[in-house]
Image (cartoon, rainbow, N blue to C red):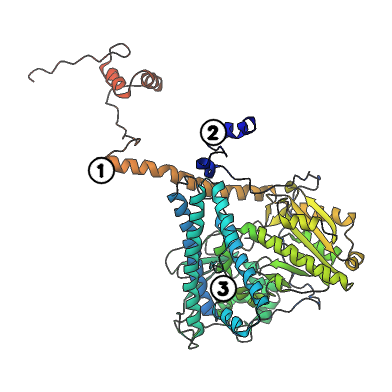
């Protein structure tokens, strides 16, 4: 019919009326984007020496929950060993997804963040089911059963089965070219393998909690000019010196008494900032001068490095760990050894997750406006690496609590105060965030309390959170910022030289307030104008964009060059083995001596004759086009 003609014209084998071909129909696009017009704000951030991305000296209000480190938890050595196993498992799962897609006929590379979206959605679905089961449990025996089956903090376990996450992964793989049945089989196999790996790591954690040794790894520590490298068993992580000072301060404030490192001496306390004092004290303990460098490129993002156990060793490095057992108490030595083990586990956790876009944060200019005009003093979704304020919630309390995390945002029950929420751009988490905030606002409105939330979401119209917040009576103002008019702090800003990155989508800022909060913190037109200007100051500079494009282009070009060379190498190897395959490139032969050819002659001959006939005719030096070459007489005496 005519109604089906546009579909059949573009996809002639995707007729929806044919059941055999229905599995080949391409699914709908991933997002329905907003199209915000540009407002003409300042397009580039002002040139400044350095941008300080946090303010740890900000006041923590009385209504903010306090950070509590659990009394029973893995020791620093055990945490580092378990994190190594988790990172290895995540790397294995990513490779498994790629191999399964290739097995089912996907010729292109799996799109970036495909695995990360599935992991986020599956873990959130598990945690949501676990919270619902805990709330509905009535018998104490059920609570005991749940305690015996803990959840892995990173790996999805498939119990209860993550049906929504599996369906979303299958839909994404269909967008990339897999058939329906192949996409579903891939999602099921990935979930099964993840559950197996999670069970193995949880068994190791149970062994460690029972007093058994998991080994005492040797941590290699190296201070460069602008960064600090930490490595165990060939796995290396990197953090900038400024971020190292920030994390050392947070650890001293919130770690237990037996883990806290000593404060800097009076000699180092005279530094310009507390973070610089921490770095100077750590350098002095390891015998490194402030200007020494290992000669490596500092301040850039490095992926996990697999190699020898001495990765990261060099001038100014130190060993953390003496080979003793964790349970026996013969742990690492040195005043900052426990800090460095906790720091290694933290950095490896967020490095293993990849997807720095999920961990992006709003910039300091935006924080200045939110704090000054809306009284924001608490972050709902952050991490020790990208938090701007000292009071924040995060997604991984097991490693974040030692650096001041208040746990999950969904565990908060505030009745007043002003919060900022920038959740990961995953539908399930954003939708749950909107539902949780709307419930809190309703309860606060009934008691006439001043409760305010500044929520940062992408401009995705298909997202339930976007529609629920925009249509809520608690929405005091919605500011839609065009993608070209703003930027974010990179999720890997603790490693990189350039802190800002462009936003790929429009950004929506929802100010959700009760009536008492609207009177106390009005979100008027002046606030919107100041907020747009602040977002514009977070646009990366032109030089930063060029550096980012150069790094990204080099990585993409390396992969493309390798993929182009593989068929050639295989064909050359087959030819050398005497078994050439169809389509393989023959080896080039050198032209005989004394034969002078030009590009024009070769091109003309190759167009009109087969290569062998053209070469024979050229060597003979006679014969019309297409004729056979004249035979030469044999030499005398033959």
The 10 Å Cα crowd at callout 1, few under 14, some 14 to 19, many 20 or more, is few
Q: Quadrant of the C terminus?
A: top left
Determine the CA span between mark 3 and mark 2.
Answer: 47 Å
Does dot 1 land on a helix, a strand or a loop? loop
Work out whether mark 3 precedes mark 2 in sequence or the reverse, and give the earlier one.
Answer: 2
Residue topped by disc 1: 577
Q: Which mark is residue 119?
A: none
Where does the image place residue 339, in percent across and percent down from the top left? Answer: 59, 78
Q: Mark 1 and mark 3 in contact? Answer it, CB < 8 Å.
A: no
Work out whether mark 1 precedes mark 2 in sequence or the reverse, and give the earlier one.
Answer: 2
Residue topped by disc 2: 12
Where does the image place residue 515, in percent across and percent down from the top left? Answer: 90, 66
Determine the CA span between mark 1 and mark 2.
Answer: 43 Å
Please state which of the two labelled residues, at mark 1 or mark 2, is closer to the viewer. 2
Residue topped by disc 3: 151
The 10 Å Cα crowd at callout 2, few under 14, some 14 to 19, many 20 or more, is few
Where does the image place residue 586, in percent across and percent down from the top left? Answer: 32, 34
Which residue is located at x 77 percent, y 45 percent?
36
Q: Up-down: is 419 above or below 70? A: above
Quadrant in the rendering for residue 40: top right
Which residue is located at x 33 percent, y 36 percent?
582
User: In terms of depth relative to the viewer, which is nearer, 433 or 225?
Assistant: 433
User: In terms of depth relative to the viewer, which is nearer, 16 or 88?
Assistant: 16
């Amino acid at each position: 019919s005519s109604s089906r003609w546009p579909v059949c014209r573009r996809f002639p084998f995707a007729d929806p009326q044919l059941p055999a071909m229905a599995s080949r129909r391409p699914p709908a696009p991933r997002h329905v984007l907003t199209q915000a017009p540009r407002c003409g704000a300042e397009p580039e951030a002002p040139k400044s020496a350095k941008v300080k991305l946090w303010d740890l000296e900000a006041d923590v209000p009385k209504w903010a929950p306090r950070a509590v480190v659990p009394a029973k938890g893995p020791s620093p050595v055990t945490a580092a060993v378990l994190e190594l196993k988790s990172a290895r498992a995540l790397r294995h799962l990513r490779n498994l997804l790629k191999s399964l897609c290739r097995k089912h006929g996907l010729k292109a590379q799996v799109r970036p963040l495909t695995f990360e979206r599935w992991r986020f959605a599956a873990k959130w679905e598990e945690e949501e089911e676990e919270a619902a089961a805990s709330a509905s449990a009535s018998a104490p025996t059920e609570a005991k059963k749940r305690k015996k089956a803990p959840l892995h903090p990173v790996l999805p376990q498939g119990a209860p089965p993550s049906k929504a996450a599996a369906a979303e992964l299958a839909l994404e793989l269909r967008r990339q070219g897999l058939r329906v049945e192949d996409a579903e089989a891939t999602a099921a196999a990935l979930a099964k393998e993840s559950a197996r790996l999670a069970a193995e790591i949880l068994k190791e954690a149970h062994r460690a909690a029972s007093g058994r040794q998991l080994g005492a790894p040797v941590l290699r520590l190296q201070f460069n000019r602008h960064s600090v490298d930490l490595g165990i068993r060939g796995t290396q992580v990197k953090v900038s010196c400024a971020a190292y000072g920030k994390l050392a301060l947070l650890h001293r404030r919130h770690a237990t008494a037996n883990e806290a490192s000593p404060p800097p001496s009076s000699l180092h306390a005279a530094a310009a900032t507390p973070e610089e004092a921490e770095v100077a004290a750590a350098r002095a303990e390891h015998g490194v001068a402030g200007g020494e460098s290992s000669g490596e490129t500092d301040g850039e993002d490095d992926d996990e490095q697999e190699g020898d156990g001495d990765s990261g060793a060099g001038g100014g490095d130190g060993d953390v760990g003496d080979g003793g057992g964790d349970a026996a108490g013969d742990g690492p030595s040195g005043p900052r050894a426990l800090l460095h083990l906790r720091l290694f586990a933290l950095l490896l956790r967020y490095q293993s997750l990849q997807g720095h876009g999920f961990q992006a944060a709003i910039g300091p200019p935006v924080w200045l406006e939110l704090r000054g005009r809306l009284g924001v003093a608490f972050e709902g979704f952050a991490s020790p690496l990208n938090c701007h304020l000292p009071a924040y919630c995060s997604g991984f309390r097991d490693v974040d609590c030692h650096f001041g995390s208040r746990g999950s945002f969904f565990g908060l029950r505030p009745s007043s105060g002003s919060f900022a929420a920038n959740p990961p751009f995953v539908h399930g988490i954003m939708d749950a965030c909107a539902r949780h905030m709307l419930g809190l606002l309703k309860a606060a409105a009934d008691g006439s309390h001043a409760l305010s939330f500044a929520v940062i979401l992408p401009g995705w119209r298909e997202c339930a959170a976007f529609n629920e917040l925009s249509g809520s009576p608690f929405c005091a103002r919605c500011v839609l910022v065009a993608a070209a008019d703003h930027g974010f702090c990179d999720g890997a800003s603790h490693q990189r030289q350039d802190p800002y990155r462009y936003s790929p989508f429009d950004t929506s800022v929802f100010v959700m307030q009760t009536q008492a909060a609207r009177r106390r913190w009005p979100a008027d037109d002046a606030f919107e104008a100041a907020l747009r200007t602040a977002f514009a100051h977070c646009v990366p500079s032109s030089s930063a964009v060029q550096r980012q494009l150069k790094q990204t282009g080099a990585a993409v070009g390396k992969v493309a060059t390798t993929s182009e060379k593989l068929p050639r190498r295989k064909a050359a190897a087959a030819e050398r083995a005497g078994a050439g395959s169809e389509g393989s490139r023959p080896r080039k032969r050198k032209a005989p001596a004394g034969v002078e050819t030009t590009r024009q002659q070769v091109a003309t001959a190759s167009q009109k004759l087969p290569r062998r006939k053209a070469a024979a005719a050229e060597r003979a030096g006679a014969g019309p086009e297409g004729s056979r070459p004249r035979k030469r007489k044999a030499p005398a005496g033959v």
